[in-house]
Amino acid sequence: METRRTTVRDVRRANRASLLTDLFHGGRQSRQQLGDTTALSQASVSNLIGEMIDEGLVEEAGLVGSDGGRPRALLRVAPGYGYVAGADVGPTRVLVELYDLAMSRLGVATYALGERGGDPRLVAAKLLEGLAAVVDEAGVQPSEVLGFGVGVTGVVDQTCDPVVHSQTNGWDGVPLGAMLREGTGVPVFVENGAKAVGQAEMWFGAGRGARHAVIVMVGAGVGAAVVMDGRGYRGANSNAGEWGHTTLVYDGDRCRCGARGCLEAYISSDRVDARLAEALGCEPDPGLLPRVLSGPVDGPAAEVITQTIGYLGAGIAGLINLFSPERIVLGGRAGLALGERCLPEIRAASARYALRHPYSKTRIDIGQLGPDAVAMGAATLPIARLLTDGGLPAAGGAPIPFSRATQRRQISRARG
């Protein structure tokens, strides 16, 4: 087997990636601080930061005092260098959002899918329509968008081009990445929605600072993102984290995937809403669970909530026993609603079913990014590529587009 030699270009890319990643996640820092945190020499830091300032990727943002010397410039990743779009493909609607590199939301578009929600061609069309809408709303050019991340339900095979396998949607090998690229020149990234949220919670939310964590999503679907030693775990075929389709009850209730007894069949938002509606003698409503939890809960509704917490606790205990994480982060619409009202009960239910020692080393927290975090998480996918590549074009790939502000600076500099 031939071993590829590391070139000077590889080292430069890696060093830029180290500096850019540290600035993005660590916030404003001086050149000296970056040298300390990345272990690069001050000469290397100055040269590489100078390159990235010239490109418009990094900018000076204030001053900090030094011990008896001149104030030092603070640096940050330039928010307007480029923009990223993220989308959440749900059972009934598509949500698309646009962000700058400071993760300020600049545009939002939502589309109902109706009865044809399972049609991948309709989903692709709405995603492209939404991308065009948010770009127009923000007043930017498509060439300034660094990437379009899409979070979906199901297994996303990343072996080659992203292909989606979702039994709940009836998708069997849908080439969503290729379908989207037919309608846009913006780089496309497709990922399982729970994994996308997991990355965002690790970067900006309740997972921040943990090296071993599991971020769980409890909504219309139920899934998890497993992080081991700071890296997302995908498994051999990209389907690690299908927590909602682990068996909770042998030969139990029918799940949307077609199997019986899946955890999702007992704790997904639509199943909980249906059981609450039956207990209360009303029609099922997607907002029923939060409304019930917003006031006193007693009688038959309390029985449904207690049972749901028991199921959720048993599922979380399984994750603790399997992965021994530092942290479990509870997200998704139903997960957040239950966590905000019943977190002590969820922790107690998890303790009943988990092994004592790993449970004692695990913290269970509520997600911090809200119920619509999938779109934000999907928007981090192109940012992750930008950081990994150090802002340079991928090997053999097209250059990363500069923003209009950067292009104006370069034209001005060229004219002297």
Image: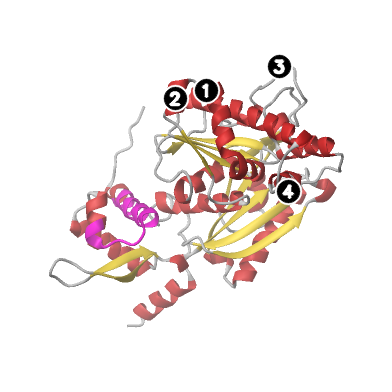
Mark 4 vs 1, N-terminal side: 4
Q: Residue at x 57, y 70 (%)?
A: 140
- Which three-letter amino acid code belongs to the residue tagged 4? Arg
**Secondary structure of residue under mark 3:** loop
Mark 4 vs mark 1: give the one in front. Answer: 4
How many angstroms separate mark 2 from mark 4 (CA)? 34 Å
Neighbours of disc 2 within 10 Å: few (<14), some (14-19), many (20+):
some
Read off the residue under disc 4.
291
Q: Magenta stretch?
A: 12-33
How many angstroms separate mark 4 from mark 3 (CA)? 32 Å
- Which three-letter amino acid code belongs to the residue tagged 2? Pro
The answer to whether residue 156 is visible is no
Q: Nearer the viewer, residue 3 or 293?
A: 293
How many angstroms separate mark 1 from mark 3 (CA)? 19 Å
Residue 355 in magenta stretch: no
Residue 71 is situated, as x and y percent measured from the top left of the image, at: 21, 71
Neighbours of disc 4 within 10 Å: few (<14), some (14-19), many (20+):
few
The label on residue 358 is: 2
Farthest residue toward the top?
250
Mark 4 vs mark 3: give the one in front. Answer: 4
How many labels, in total? 4
Residue 376 is situated, as x and y percent measured from the top left of the image, at: 56, 53
Quarter of the rendering occupied by the C terminus: bottom left
How many angstroms separate mark 4 from mark 1 (CA)? 30 Å
The answer to whether residue 228 is visible is yes
Q: Residue at x 75, y 17 (%)?
A: 251
**Secondary structure of residue under mark 2:** helix
Q: Which quadrant of the figure has residue 297?
A: top right
- Which three-letter amino acid code belongs to the residue tagged 3? Tyr
The label on residue 250 is: 3
